[in-house]
Amino acid sequence: MTDSRPYDIVILGATGFTGGLTAEYLARVAQGENLRWAIAGRSMKKLDQCKRRLSKIGGSGSEPGLLRCDVRDPQSLSDTVAQARVLITTVGPYIHHGEPVVRACIEQQCDYVDLTGEPEFVDRLRHKYGERAREQGVRIVNCCGFDSIPHDLGALFTIRELGKRVEGDVRGEAIKLEGFVTAGGRFSGGTWHSAVHAFNRWRDYQKDRKYWRKKAAKQPRNSNRIVKAVFPDLRFRRSLGAWAVPFPTIDPQVVMRSAKAIPDYGARFDYGHYVLVRKLPRVLMGVAAVGGIFTLAQINMGRDWLLQQVSQGEGPSESQRERGWFRVVFQGRSSQCRITTQVSGGDPGYDETAKMLAESALCLAKDDIPKTAGIVTPAIAMGDALITRLQSAGIRFEVLA
Ligand SMILES: NC(=O)c1ccc[n+]([C@@H]2O[C@H](COP(=O)([O-])OP(=O)(O)OC[C@H]3O[C@@H](n4cnc5c(N)ncnc54)[C@H](OP(=O)(O)O)[C@@H]3O)[C@@H](O)[C@H]2O)c1
């Protein structure tokens, strides 16, 4: 990416809830990072209000530029991303708003980070735009929030630490890794809308997946390494004192894509992903609640009713976020040794997500990292450099045993 562009980072969606928190984070670090940045959106009035708020946080000299940009207007999108080295977008649901943004970034050779946790969107990008992004030398990095940074970088951190304990080359090892997540926090209107739309589109997504799988099976394999998901089972884990419930988020897919691309994950890599719940009745209540919402979202009337229950633009208050927390424990083993690690921090969905997203963009814009290209995961694109950044920003990566 060329330095002659006016901005290191442009953030699209700063007038929304999570984008607003991400812009506040950037305002706080802008001077220290020597950052040239801008906020973009469809309403200049809202952008002006946002800039005034940010000026109070960052002080003079750190104010962002303002760019008018509507994701439904290809010219405004193209003009916006042409001015940036890295684009952050928090305009969701991504399945509705994300594709034109990615297309513009690829054509204008602007690196890209987002907050999606929508598997359909990411799969669609990989199959439609993977090759073009590689040709253009552009890094399209999805899932740079709580989905899936703690899991993806936590797995990478565990592999690095395991590698220190293994005699010889870790690349020859068979490694089994399991991630167990627990978290407390509330969600925003934007997250609720994205989840309800994803549930509503489940059947269409399954059809597309079948087609993509068939197509991929015809491609020649270019590695003998094996990367597989652990068969999901519901079990009480005595070592963790809780029930481990298989949870179909995008996180295990992201970890396994990183494992496929990075040989340090071993000659064979098996990954299991679970939510930890202490009491069995809570497991049953959780499954019933998610099942109920999923079923209701299958019919359009049910979907619309669900969408009306929480408005976009709203999210948890500062005091609610202050009570938020998350912890992901990883248990890994190879033929030679075992390891337990943990990634933890504060409010998962918003305060820490804003930090993860902003630091991901800063890492792409400012750090001297190995150049990758394509539709890539955080571990592939930013890897160890982003772990270092997040540790400095207060997210804990620890070896427990
Ligand atoms: N995976 C994770 O860890 C995680 C965590 C948090 C959030 N998220 C995701 O992040 C996304 C945003 O969530 P949120 O709660 O911040 O949503 P939000 O408050 O509703 O914000 C949406 C933003 O998109 C903008 N926007 C909408 N349509 C646009 C268009 N046509 N052109 C340009 N901008 C447009 C809105 O601008 P206006 O102000 O003009 O309406 C607003 O700035 C959701 O998809 C959510 O699922 C993911």
Image (cartoon, grey):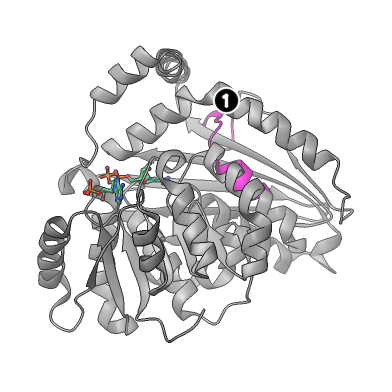
Horizontal arrangement in the rendering, residue 25 relative to residue 330 (left or right): left
In percent of width and height, residue 326 lies at 40, 46
| The residue at label 1 has a CB less than 8 Å from ligand 1 | no
In the rendered structure, which segment of residues is drawn in magenta? 236-256
At horizontal 40% and vertical 18% (from top left) the residue drawn is: 293
Q: Secondary structure at mark 1?
A: helix
Going by the numbered disc 1, the residue's amino acid type is Asp
Q: Is residue 225 above or below residue 25?
A: above
- Name which residue lies at 54% across and 60% down: 140
* Viewer-side residue, 225 vs 96: 96
Specify the quadrant of the image occupied by residue 394.
bottom left
Residue 318, given in percent of the width and then of the height, sits at 17, 49
Q: Residue at x 50, y 26 (%)?
A: 201
Residue 366 percent coordinates (x, y): 45, 80
- 230 is higher (above) or lower (below) than 202: below
Q: Position of residue 261 (x, y in %)?
A: 72, 59
For the residue pair 232 and 249, the one nearer the viewer reads as 249
Q: Is residue 144 magenta?
A: no
Disc 1 target residue: 204
Tell me if I can see residue 132 in this picture: yes
In the picture, residue 123 is in which quadrant? top right
Q: Residues within 10 Å of mark 1 (few under 14, many from 20)?
A: few
Q: Residue at x 40, y 81 (%)?
A: 5
